[in-house]
Image (cartoon, rainbow, N blue to C red):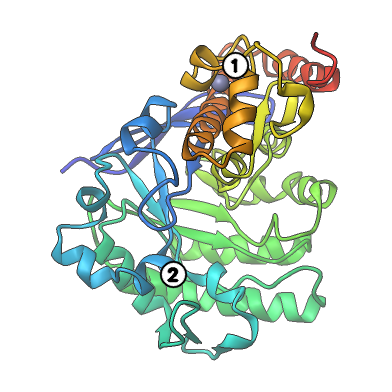
Amino acid sequence: MSKFTFQLSATDGRARTGVISTPRGEIRTPAFMPVGTAATVKAMLPESVRATGADILLGNTYHLMLRPTAERIARLGGLHGFMNWDRPILTDSGGFQVMSLADLRKLTEEGVSFKSHIDGSKHMLSPERSMEIQRLLGSDIVMCFDECPALPAERAQIAESMRLSMRWAQRSRDAFGDRPGHALFGIQQGGLEQDLRAESAEALRGIGFDGYAIGGLAVGEGQEAMFGCLDYAPDQLPSDKPRYLMGVGKPDDIVGAVKRGVDMMDCVLPSRSGRTGQAWTRRGPVAIKNARHADDPRPLDETCTCPACTGYSRAYLHHVFRAGEMISGMLLTWHNLHYFQELMSGMRAAIASGTFEAWEAEFHAQRALGDIERV
Ligand SMILES: [Zn+2]
């Protein structure tokens, strides 16, 4: 079986481009990973997700362990076959989602016990159980089980939580074992505290991982604070391994993260927005429900080659959204995922040719024009 490798091919400033190779295929970086929470990227067939240019999907341990359960998916041959996606899958550890359960969970050194949001049944997640679930799912990139405190938080609390996550990172590493072709990523924590981030990175380096995630950001701190942290956090992690910023984000967040040396990102935004009538375009977000689109025969974006833009007018997209038709979510999700992947491919090409700065200036110039002005 071939191995999991990461090969950088070019850098431009702090931005990097390269390829992650896995037995299930290559992942071009910087990469955007659509989120397939419940073994589906909502409103999309897997082949349609692939057609947008996605090399890898993200699945959620928390949701899949509750329904239909990891054991059932394993009996049916694993997540890839179950959801009909044969390319790489990254699964999160469940840590972030159980954190958001607030008063439904109990945290100890051992792990987190919690009640299902579906039926109130009792469950336990620990580093060992998270590794077992992600193995049963057949995940290609497995994430360490960690604790992610909500921001803002007291420094002492962030430090304590980070050190717990580092002990869990060692337990995750031990439980993961030796699985050729599969990767385990560590997760850096430490909030917005540079020295705690450094301590976390040092601990993770000491354990040794196939890739390193920057966790605990995009949790309400705002873009300025996030970029402030990304001004140093990626460089605290090994440069020869992929760096993954979890849960990011809006297009301008993504561009700013890539500029600061991030290789991988994931976010529900393009698919969630697609279902709520928001399109993301090079001119910024467009609310398709607005009356100004009702008689507009033009596509969402005349430069976009997705099915929503090549086959349908703004007037039609406006109509099916207002009428509550399913095709509304399907077309807008397709467009949004296509736009996000075009963004990544544009950045990869710009980094490879050493023109990232000019590319970024054009990105911001287009957005500054805005959608409303383009008549
Ligand atoms: Zn489009």
Label of residue 62 in the image: 2
Residue type, label 2? Tyr
Q: Residue at horizontal 26%, vertical 55%? A: 79
Residue 210: tell me if it is visible.
no
Quick one: label 2, few (<14), some, or many (20+) residues within 10 Å? many
Can you give x and y, in whole percent of width and height, for residue 117 in the image? 50, 78
Considering the numbered disc 1 on the image, is that residue within a helix, a strand or a loop?
loop
Quadrant placement of the C terminus: top right
Label of residue 222 in the image: none
In three-dimensional space, the C-alpha distance between marks 2 and 1, rounded to whole angstroms, equals 39 Å
Depth check, front residue: 374 or 236: 374
Give the residue pinned by disc 1. Answer: 313
Q: Are marks 2 and 1 in contact (CB under 8 Å)?
A: no
Can you give x and y, in whole percent of width and height, for residue 82 in the image? 22, 53
Quadrant placement of the N terminus: top left
Depth check, front residue: 321 or 200: 321
